Image (cartoon, rainbow, N blue to C red):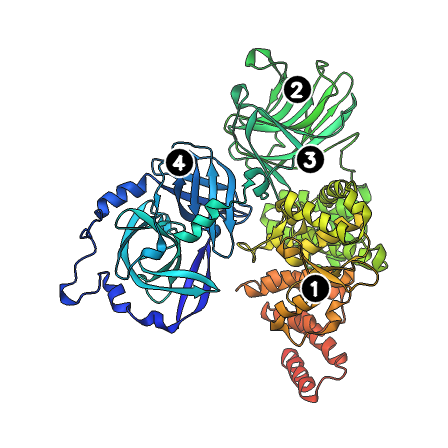
Amino acid sequence: MREATFFMGSRALAIVGVMAWLASGQEEVRKGIVAGGEEAKPMVEVAKGGRSVEDLARMMKRSLVKITQTGRTGVDGLGTGFVVSGDGLIATNLHVIGEARPLTVELEDGTELEVEAVHATDAKLDLALLKVREKGLKALKMGDSELMEQGERLVAMGNPEGLEFSVVEGVVSAIREVEIEGVPMLQVALPIERGNSGGPVLNGRGEVVGVLTLKSLRTDNLGFAMPVNALKGLIEKPNPVPMERWLTIGVLDKRQWEVKMGSRWSQRAGVVRAETAGDGFGGRSLCLAKTEALEDEFEAMVSVRLDEESGAAGLAFCSDGGERHYGFYPSAGKLRLTRFDGADVYSWTILKDEPVAAYRAGDWNTLRVRVEEDVIRCWVNGVLAMEAEDTGLRGGRVGLCKFRDTVAEFRGFKTGRDLAPPAASVALTEKVQTTLGAYLEKGMDADEALERLIEDEASAARRLVVERRRELERQAAALKEVEKEMHRRAVTREMMRELAKEDEATDLLRCALLLARHDNPELEVAVYVQAVQRLAAEVRALPEVAAGGESAIRRMNQFLFVENGFHGSRNDYQSLSNSYVNEVIEDREGLPITLSVVYLELARMAGVKGVFGVPLPGKFMVGFHPSPDEEMKLVDVFERGRLTSIEEAEGELNDFRPFDPEVLRPATKREIVLRMIKNLLASALDEEGRVQGAMPYLNLVLALNPESPPERFARARLRQTAGDKPGATEDVRWLIENAGDLPEGVLGQLERWLESMEE
């Protein structure tokens, strides 16, 4: 048996089960020559009627492109493509371009080509065509893959491991075709490395006969290519998707923001990011919120972080949607308030430009402005930084601004009548100070300290803890853990309160977002609730949805998975981003259960009745009844809303047999949330050294479901591993006291475990 590997972004997907006959011819593959005994000729020699390797390399290089795929954590894949049509068609592998990923396409001379559409894709063949705006490109000639002969010389080019435009040569090691997962592939004797995927395979006449796709794990010189005749079918029958529809990850939500004066603005995990200079004078660019016009008296707030302090970025307000607005922002380490009355510096008035001690260079800084009838007040990190009696502009729009080549990040943008954080009471301040002093200096038990701190006014207490942490740098590590655990416990209590309601009254979306907030304290739940509400308003207005039944489901599927690009994650399946519903909403990419949560809540808000979660083993789905008399159907949200029957789903999930009909009942919201937590727990336990990373999820599961022996046992083990003997003892005692019908041998093991810890 032999194994082959798809090069899929940063990971390789092992494909096993290639037939045993591949073992034949390995020696000639390793030698890299055409079979022929001692007199075998090196492949560099020109075949009859063919071209030299040098000629073929020059010809390929002008038609080859390097393709870089950007994912959730930066560069997610590197591959090759080649021009198949002078009017801008480029062929490659589908796994090279990923799914809904931003792409960079670069010619050999460094020219970047703008991708305007994914012209055609075929997942089974692992082929894709990109359409770029550039015209007059040099296309490679298509050959006929059915005419190849065994031993025929081949030349290929790609970007192995980032080494751009490298040429390799080899032979057709078999005229036979091998099927891998039902797809016919050509066996070629060529060195294939990561980055070669999507590159052309040429015969000696300079014709494309294949597209590099797979590599054997047993030898560096054995690989596979997709026959070029399969690519011709995509060229003849494309299924184009414009890039603005293809891209979902990191795309600025046009329902919320409007960009003025260029620059590259993106949105990711609740953070808006601005890169590159804008089109305005001084590289100015605006990103204005699509909110209702503000009154003459209002406040605006945002947290901003600059990549370097020589830059400038912050709040824009009282904007006319064009060149006129105010700006309050850090610039060269100072805080600046400017009135912009036109397109150039001669129409700009710097009202204030001062250093402010409260500003933290290189860190997140919260800016807040208050606009009144005759004065503008500006704060940074809660400290009043400046006031200006200027009445030049009032009303208008509010948003973000940046200048020059600054790379800036923004989060927590909001507007309102009064955004000042509520002041902590004197009594609460004294309580926090006393409790922290007892914990840090007098050895108060951590649990006791935490309970005292969060029993009332938890958010205000957290702010005071953060301030104290900054003051006491030598104790910062301990305070940070206190802050984190306070936050987690506060979130846990919110989830418990929500899940304590009747199932019908429980807000599933809020619970799912609280789970994400459990790991990300900066997440603003309301922002993402509003995002789903905006989608629901659009769905509710669709006539097919108003009609109800299966037509409503099909139209909702079209809206969610085609028009808005939601899809199951394949390249980044293990990414924690797939388990955080806020990131699923932003990136339109997720796991079956997180996509199901979005689907269920969208249906609820849009008034689509009779939709529920179905907890199938290994793959969560959405269920509905087309009519009261018809059998339940399933919506496979991971496969873009594909409708399937119970029998089909049972067949697909045969690895989990016997199929228990119990899994077809509607899942309660508590069950859905617990399943999401256990997904995160499994991810944490899969990674070495993540004992502390897994503990918060075990605590959360047991807070919501304290009668769960498996999680209780797992926590006891982790507590013991982490050196927390009292905690481990507590959990083992609980297991013994609640052993119930456990076999006698298991109970005895638990008792011996407890004795060993009490010694």
Q: Quadrant of residue 594?
A: bottom right
- Residue 438, percent from left and from top: 71, 55
Q: Which residue is mark 1?
A: 645
Q: Residues within 10 Å of mark 4 (few under 14, many from 20)?
A: some
The secondary element bearing badge 4 is classed as: loop
As displayed, is residue 62 above or below residue 604? above
Mark drawn on residue 255: 3
Q: Which residue is mark 4?
A: 86
CA separation, marks 3 and 4?
37 Å
Residue in the foreground of this view, choosing between 42 and 471: 42
Q: Nearer the viewer's eye, disc 3 or disc 4? A: 4
Q: Residue at x 79, y 38 (%)?
A: 422
Q: Amino acid at mark 2?
A: His
> Split into 4 quadrants, where in the image is the N terminus?
bottom left
Q: Tell me if 466 is positioned left or right of 500 in this view.
A: left
- Of label 3 and label 2, which has the lower sequence position? 3
- Of label 1 and label 2, which has the lower sequence position? 2
Mark 4–mark 2 CB contact (< 8 Å): no
Residue in the foreground of this view, choosing between 12 and 363: 12
Q: Is residue 486 visible?
A: no
Q: Nearer the viewer's eye, disc 3 or disc 2? A: 3
Q: Residue at x 44, y 58 (%)?
A: 6
Q: Residue at x 67, y 80 (%)?
A: 754
Mark 4–mark 1 CB contact (< 8 Å): no
